[in-house]
Image (spheres, coloured by chain):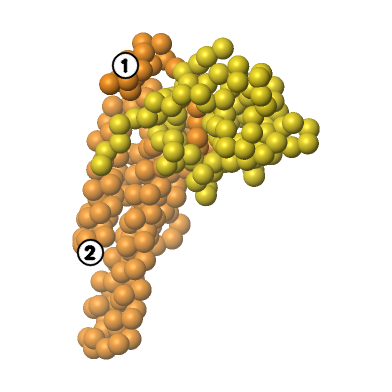
Amino acid sequence: MLYELVEKLDKKFGFDRARAHCDVPCGIYDPILPQIAALTVVRMIDLMAAFDKDHAEKDLAYFNTMTRYIAVKEEHAEKVKQDVRVIWGDYFKAQHIEQYPELQALTHEIMSLGSKCRQTVDREVALKLVDKLNRFAEIFWATKNVAVKRAKSPYAPALELVYPNL
Amino acid sequence: MIKFLRVTGRSLEPDFQEGDFVVVSKIPLLIRPACRGDVVAFHKPPYGLLIKRVEYLTHAGALFVLGTHTASMDSLQFGPIRRQDVLGKVIGHIKKPRRE
């Protein structure tokens, strides 16, 4: 009751915020981290497919290597989600969302694709994740008035990424 | 002399949570210096307006403040707070209804 009343006053008068924050507001954000993590997911799917094709015998060594590929895929798909959540939550502000209304749905789609990449070995899903992250990066750099370029990553799986054109 | 503030962040959980409101005033500090356990709001560039709990007063009268969360940004990182930077002591706390 009292809280609702004070909340209404806050909406009307806009009280100052007292920060009880834990992290240092360092201001260092870069979507290249989730972009590279998404490339790693594609790479792991490729390695898994090639390894499975080349190893008819499913012995302990096979499962050991395959498990390691899976673990890395899991880790990097989750890293995509974590890094995008930080940029979404800490960097993007209301005015950015107003300027780029697609951000909301785009971020949600990245979250869903990240989960899908953990659940499956569908290369198309991983490629879509890279594609959505490129769009996320384009918007991110646009909010900083930094021009971007598209170039193939100089390592496998050699997919096109959006980079800041510095 | 009295101000309403809205708490953001989690460094004072579980006592103060995101969305809580606090009433701060400088008057109590004019009567008696801050002491261990008091919660104060203060300005700390470049972080802005912060809220933390007083751990102790230094010999020079500055406030060494801490959060309750292990990852709190507080005097362990930025040192004691000068008295003139203190906006006031928390004298009222309106908690956001907690979800059980």
Residue at 70% across / 28% down in the picture?
Answer: B82
Kindly check if marks 2 and 1 are in contact, taking CB atoms under 8 A apart as contact.
no
Q: Among the chains, which one is yellow? A: B
Taking depth in this image into account, of A128 and B40 the one nearest to the observer is: B40
Q: Among the chains, which one is orange? A: A
Residue A155, position as x, y percentages in the image: 43, 60
Dot 1 falls on which chain? A
| Residue identified by numbered label 1 | A5
Residue A98, position as x, y percentages in the image: 33, 22
Real-space Cα separation, disc 2 to disc 1, in angstroms: 52 Å
Residue A51, position as x, y percentages in the image: 29, 77
Q: Furthest residue to the front?
A: B31
Residue at 38% across / 49% down in the picture?
Answer: A82
SS type, badge 1 = helix
User: Which image quarter holds the C terminus of chain B?
Assistant: top left
Taking depth in this image into account, of B40 and A19 the one nearest to the observer is: B40
Residue at 45% across / 57% down in the picture?
Answer: A154
Q: Amino acid at mark 2?
A: Val
SS type, badge 2 = loop
Taking depth in this image into account, of B31 and A9 the one nearest to the observer is: B31
| Residue identified by numbered label 2 | A121
Dot 2 falls on which chain? A
Q: Amino acid at mark 1?
A: Leu
Vertical order, A97 against A44 (above or below): above
Mark 1, other Cα within 10 Å: few <14 / some 14–19 / many ≥20: few
Residue B57, position as x, y percentages in the image: 70, 36
Indicate which disc, 2 or 1, sits on the residue closer to the N terminus: 1
User: Which image quarter holds the N terminus of chain B?
Assistant: top right
